[in-house]
Amino acid sequence: MSSMSSPTEKHKPGASSALSRLLKRGALIFGVAAFTLLAWRVYDSEQGPALQPWHLRVPHELSREQIDRADWAAWLQAENRLFAEVKRDVTDTLDPAQVPPFNRYRVDSRVYPPRFATDWNRSYLLRPSGTPRGVVVLLHGLTDSPYSLRHIAKRYVAHGYLAVGLRLPAHGTVPAALTDAHWQDWLAATRLALRTARAEVPAPAPLHLVGYSNGGALAVKYALDALGDPQLPRAQRLVLISPMIGVAPSARFAGLAAWPAVFPAFSKAAWLNLRPEYNPFKYNSFPVNGARQSWLLTDAVQSQLQALAGDPRLQQLPPVLGFQSLTDATVSTQAVVTGLFARLPANGSELVIFDLNRTSDFDGLLDPSSLTSLTGLLPALPGNYATQVLSNEGTGTSQLEEISRAAQSLESTRRLLDLNYPAGMFSLSHVALPFPVDDALYGTQPSAREDFGVHLGTVAARGERGVLVVPMDELMRLSANPFYPYLIQRIEALIDQTTVSSLIQ
């Protein structure tokens, strides 16, 4: 009897065998699916244009350890070596017969940055006349350069501030640099810029930190780090423009798209798009790693904010003035509200939202979800921050009004503004906010005082599909802000307020 098996024991081998077959089948399905996706990725990437020297040559930046040991002079020396390397390994190797003349890396091109009076790809210090009353550090966005915040920097200088415009590592040179970039390097450079700011203008003079897009995420990350590190100079104010607090969830898996690139024959898979490089101060090509690093940075910011919930140190976070378009194809407006502002202490922070154009000109043409998204965006309960919504929904015309709500209140006040939505414009865009309409490169009414070889804000291409080498949606995207006077007025009021407060103290 002891040799007899129980009914349960008799079924064990069969059950185990069935489970094994199920696992094998699942693994096979997964393997086939993965192979199919990778094969499709290889095929898709190989359809694009060939890689060029600016996609292949990765220049040598300082390591984050070197950045943390460097001062501003050492940073500029390294930057000079970096740009010399790009000229030697990229510009000087180009065959004019193979590269179109409208290219930022051709020395004879009208968009070749070194030919301009100022190459805004480089880091800079802008000094006011006399002793600085304060200092501001400005952090640009992903694929961008210090050019993007120069207008705001100059307004700070006009108010007596020293402006520190930082070129973040892997920017301003060649797009290939972003294939080997890490967000921790950007943060190390941010620390360097803040050290420089305080070395140039010691406390108690006010220190502001301005971040645009990816630079906004870096500004928040630095401010959070400074709460727990007394060695990091603290900013008294944060100004965030289209801040990258959240991106599309798919960016989390962007790195998978580059897997085929481990084989040299499929190196183009490391790129999400390959575009002609016609912009003197911004990359047009975009590698997979850029998307991956932006997600990692935003994830680190979100995790740190969650970890500090209820921590008394969060009360010391500087007040934030944020500017955000309701519609933004690059960053998540919802994440700006719920991922950042909803977690701020009651410290005088404010969020400005630019609404869509609600006139009847666009009835039936706008996505219905965009028309209703503003209602569900702001919290139903009083929050710790004030809001201003610039909208023409209540005016019935193109004229905007400011709908203001104070912190800890649900009561709104309305004020008509001397601003109008231009004809034919249905919204702002992620890239437009920091540029006035007279910006020489991106402006819709470019100033004649400067010439950067092209007026990207006035391109209004018409013709047949498939002819242009640049996608039509890129040319149609708004590149300058018709409401910039409001944005800069709010920032200037903040400058004066902070300066007066520091003098009183």
Image: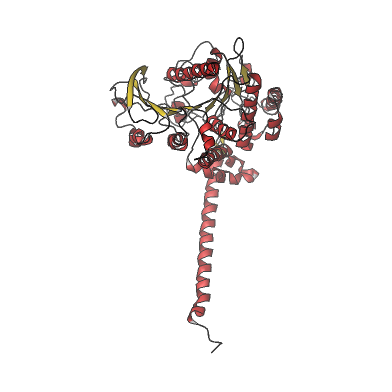
Front residue of 347 and 101: 347
**How did the renderer colour the structure?**
secondary structure
What residue do we see at 51% from left, 68% from top? 19
Residue at 44%, 25% in the rendered image: 478
| Quarter residue 476 falls in | top left
Taking 266 as reference, is 315 above or below it?
Answer: above
Q: Position of residue 86 (x, y in %)?
A: 68, 27
Residue 397 placed where, x, y %? 29, 21
Write the residue at 52% across / 83% down.
5
On screen, residue 373 above or below 123? below
Q: Quadrant of the C terminus?
A: top right
User: Is residue 267 shown to the viewer in this render?
Assistant: yes
**Farthest residue toward the bottom?**
1
Residue 60 in view in this figure: no
Res 166 → quadrant: top right
Task: Give percent across and percent down for residue 431.
Answer: 48, 27
Picture mark count: 0
Q: Is residue 97 above or below residue 155?
A: below
Residue extending furthest front? 505
